[in-house]
Image: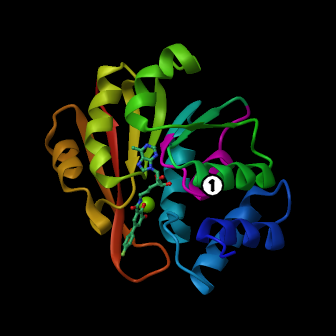
């Protein structure tokens, strides 16, 4: 039977990456997606911007919206301090199965909690079910029309504190116009655009970093 793209990405990790070496997992996925078949990972170019923001924030608690195959999950978690935790939300069970194996290959199970379900349903449960106070960093990379409603939901649920950082992928391509308009015009956010390119291509894309001012 025909394999799926996520299954082929997992295969590339298992064939080319070293168990317990997160950066080799990241490299294996980038090489596969650049040379064999494109996939919607944040990728190596935007990934370097992601790395710099993660290192600058040095977060104890991270929320990722949209796990897919776990590329950015592993990339972020590989930079976290010892007791930091990353919660990643994914509503497609097939993608979740693959991502769990990618995360395991990287040896990052202790830092990452992958929760299956829709962000809109899970965000209101973060405090009671997952013992979260607030998130120091949120990486938005799920359906683009969910960025704004989920940001408002995180505010309403008291999951953002003064200084919490939102980092949003794809604000140009495919684009998140309503979200961009909101974070750039709201007095409660200080936003900055990092110009880059769509993963593995020369098409313009970028990340928007928005600090919640409380
Ligand atoms: C509300 C909810 N709750 C939980 N999980 C959720 C969720 N909504 C989606 N998910 C999950 O997250 C991922 C979805 C990611 C969506 N990303 C993109 O569509 C995307 C597309 C491109 C792209 C650019 C140019 C093209 F020509 C074609 C595609 C690039 C990207 O970087 C993208 O991120 C996927 O794993 C999905 O199951
Ligand atoms: Mg993306």
* x, y percent for residue 4: 61, 70
> Which portion, as a residue range, is magenta?
64-82
Please tell me whether residue 19 is drawn above or below residue 38 in the rendered image.
Answer: above
Which residue matches tag 1?
75
Inspect the magenta stretch and tell me whether residue 65 lies in it: yes
Residue 105, image quadrant: bottom right
Left or right side of 128 for 189: left
Secondary structure state at the residue bearing disc 1? helix
User: Is 87 drawn above or below residue 139 in the view shown?
Assistant: above
**Identity of the residue furthest to the right in this view:** 19
Q: Provide residue 123's location: percent of width, then percent of height.
A: 42, 28
- Ligand 1 in which quarter: bottom left
**Which residue is located at x 31 percent, y 25 percent?**
155
Q: Nearer the viewer, residue 2 or 47?
A: 2
Of the 4 image quadrants, the one containing the C terminus is top left
Most foreground residue, 93 or 64: 93
**Residue furthest out toward the front:** 1
* Quadrant of the rendered image containing residue 13: bottom right
Left/right placement of residue 85 relative to residue 91 reads: right
């Amino acid at each position: 039977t025909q394999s799926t793209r996520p299954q082929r990405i997992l295969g590339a990790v298992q064939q080319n990456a070293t168990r317990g070496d997160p950066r080799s997992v990241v490299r294996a996925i980038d090489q596969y997606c650049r040379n064999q078949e494109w996939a919607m990972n944040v990728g190596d170019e935007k990934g370097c911007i992601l790395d710099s923001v993660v290192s600058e924030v040095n977060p104890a608690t991270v929320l990722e919206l949209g796990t897919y195959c776990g590329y950015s999950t592993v990339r972020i978690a590989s930079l976290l301090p010892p007791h930091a935790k990353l919660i990643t939300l994914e509503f497609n069970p097939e993608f979740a199965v693959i991502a769990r194996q990618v995360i395991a290959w990287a040896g990052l199970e202790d830092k990452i909690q992958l929760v299956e379900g829709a962000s809109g349903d899970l965000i209101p449960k973060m405090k009671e079910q997952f013992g979260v106070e607030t998130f120091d960093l949120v990486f938005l990379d799920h359906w683009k029309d969910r960025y704004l409603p989920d940001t408002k939901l995180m505010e309403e649920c008291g999951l953002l504190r003064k200084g919490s950082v939102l980092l949003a992928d794809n604000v140009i391509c495919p684009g998140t116009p309503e979200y961009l308009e909101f974070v750039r015009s709201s007095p409660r956010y200080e936003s900055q655009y990092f110009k880059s390119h769509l993963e593995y291509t020369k098409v313009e894309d970028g990340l928007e970093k928005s600090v919640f001012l409380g």
